[in-house]
Amino acid sequence: MRVGARLKRMDDSPLKNFATGIVRMLVGAGHRALFAGGCVRDMLRGAEPNDFDVATSARPSDVMKLFGRTVPVGAAFGVVRVLSPGDDPLCVEVATFRGDGAYTDGRHPDTVTYTNEVEDVKRRDFTINGLLFDPLKDELLDYVGGREDLDRKLIRAIGDPKLRFAEDHLRMLRAVRFAARLDFEIDGHTLGAIKDCAANVMTVSAERIRDELNLMLTGPNPRLAFELLKKCRLLRYVLPDIDALQGVPQPAQFHPEGDVWEHTLMLLGQLCNSPLTVALGALLHDVGKPATIEMADRIRFNEHEKVGAGMAEKIMEHLKYSREQIERVSALVRGHMAFKDVKKMRPATLKRFLRQAYFDEHLALHKLDCLASHGDLGAYNFCVNELARETPETLRPEPLITGHDLIALGLKPGPQFAEILKDVEDRQLEQALTDKSAALEYIKTTHLK
């Protein structure tokens, strides 16, 4: 099947040209070589591939002899990384056509045999990822119906979906990610197999689950991804605390949108290719509500932000996020309710609030939260206007005094130091004190009586 007219509308990138050169050299040496997988799918969609993979009849040893710079990243599975010359090399993975034996660990085949392109495609995950393309002949090779599924916008497992998911349990999450990223539906048989096999995702490492969740959250349609995780019964296993949000009621005067799950989905629905920490903040900001719900004069969730921050930290630790990511996201969860008080804050308190680390992320989460509930952006606009009025010098002025100044006044280091320094900074932020001499006089008359 020739598809050149569609593919040639795209400008050839340096990476594509490099990959084509690899194919040309392999073919020139007497081997069969083709573009494979996601790069073919994306080219057919008119999207620029992020990477190019080449599938070939050449053995890894043949590949390493042919090319100057190679790295055997998966030699046991026939995978060699080929690098271009230069300090910032391009990279293409070249994999030998293979057939897989049994998968006893739910991730890797116990044995691998080298085979032909047809058998190689049959062991791949989804039909849209099973397409091959010959860039030298401008020819598409489709042995699994991937082109039709691409046109139908369908995620369908190759062959028996339960067998595909038994081979690698992560494929269930990949099905959800591809469906959300491409705005495709999941084929009925494939969806049914995911539901039946969902519990097996618990055998997947936390790091691999985290990486798939990250791609969903920072992709073009996080809401659809999490709706599908729920529909496929995967959410209860990968994020049980998020699964528990469904059915938790909220006070209608503040949350006309519905329960905590629907509110969270509405936040996710506003995201598109967003920063990871903001997306995680949106997902986890109300995770503490089920544990803190009280039915009094109305539904209340007292201190749910503090409880939620602790829960968010444990969830992210389990998924092996970095300490820096955990601290940023838990701070977002802990601080998301503070905006309701901004108009009542004394000037010094407000300035400290506005200058906190990653305040742009706090502000972004607050806006998402408002738009997914009552819609009142009064506090958001107030903060934006205050930030526009301030300068780095007024938000973070050089201290008028230090601990050395307090010692020179005869004070001994101790808890009182912090109290005095904060008091002086408060008055400095409020422009009641503007120079060192005035600050020292203030200390003498206020703190040294």
Image (cartoon, rainbow, N blue to C red):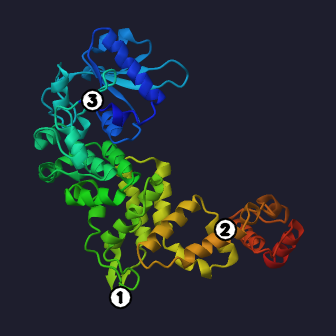
Residue 245 visible, this angle = yes
Amino acid beneath label 1:
Arg
Name the side, left or right, on which 38 lies relative to 427.
left
Between disc 2 and disc 3, whose residue precedes? 3
Q: Residues within 10 Å of mark 1 (few under 14, many from 20)?
A: few
Measured Cα–Cα span from mark 2 to mark 3: 57 Å
Disc 2 target residue: 387
Amino acid beneath label 2:
Leu
Disc 1 target residue: 298
Mark 1 or mark 3, whichever is nearer to me: 3
Q: How many marks?
A: 3
Quadrant, the N terminus: top left
Mark 2 or mark 3, whichever is nearer to me: 3
Between disc 1 and disc 2, whose residue precedes? 1
Disc 3 target residue: 2
| Mark drawn on residue 166 | none
Amino acid beneath label 3:
Arg
Measured Cα–Cα span from mark 1 to mark 2: 35 Å
Q: Are marks 1 and 2 in contact (CB under 8 Å)?
A: no
Q: Compared with residue 237, is residue 418 higher up or lower down, i.e. above or below?
A: below
Considering the numbered disc 2 on the image, is that residue within a helix, a strand or a loop?
Answer: helix
Q: Are marks 1 and 3 in contact (CB under 8 Å)?
A: no
Q: Residue at x 31, y 11 (%)?
A: 61
